[in-house]
């Protein structure tokens, strides 16, 4: 296993916990969760729609959907970076 994989997994887990904590502290946690979910899914859709022009696509799976839903646009960016590295 590469040396950077374990810190990368730790960073993703940390970011997920920070986002969940921020959502739970708001006055309307369900609305906050839905409003943070929409941009991530939209970014994943946009990346896949533009794949004909950019030749970069993220395969849609439960893992990529949950990553983009929970982490939002930074999650999609992380998926793109990981795809280019791996």
Image: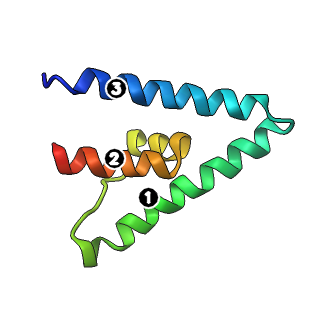
The circle drawn on residue 79 is: 2
Where residue 70 appears, as percent x and y from the top left, is 55, 40
Q: Earlier in the sequence, mark 3 or mark 1?
A: 3
Q: Quadrant of residue 21?
A: top right
Where residue 9 appears, as percent x and y from the top left, is 34, 26
- Which quadrant: the C terminus? top left
Separation of disc 2 and disc 3 at Cα?
A: 12 Å
Answer above or below: position of 65 versus 4: below
Badge 1 is on which residue?
A: 44
Separation of disc 3 and disc 1 at Cα?
A: 20 Å
Indicate left or right for 23 with 53 as reference.
right
Residue lying furthest right: 27
Where residue 35 appears, as percent x and y from the top left, is 70, 51
Determine crowd level at label 2: few under 14, some 14-19, many 20+ residues with C-alpha closer than 10 A: some
Q: Which one is in front in this view, the residue at disc 1 or the one at disc 2?
A: 2
- Which quadrant: the N terminus? top left
Task: Name the element at disc 1.
Answer: helix
Residue in the image at 38% along x and 65% along y? 47
Badge 3 is on which residue?
A: 9
Callout 1–callout 2 Cβ contact below 8 Å: yes
Residue in the image at 46% along x and 47% along y? 74
């Amino acid at each position: 296993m590469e040396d950077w994989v374990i810190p990368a997994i730790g960073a993703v887990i940390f970011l997920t916990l920070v986002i969940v904590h921020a959502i739970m502290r708001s006055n309307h946690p369900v609305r906050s969760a839905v409003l943070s979910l929409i941009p991530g899914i939209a970014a994943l859709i946009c990346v896949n729609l533009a794949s004909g022009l950019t030749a970069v696509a993220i395969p849609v799976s439960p893992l990529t959907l949950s990553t983009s839903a929970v982490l939002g646009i930074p999650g999609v960016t992380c998926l793109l970076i990981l795809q280019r590295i791996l």
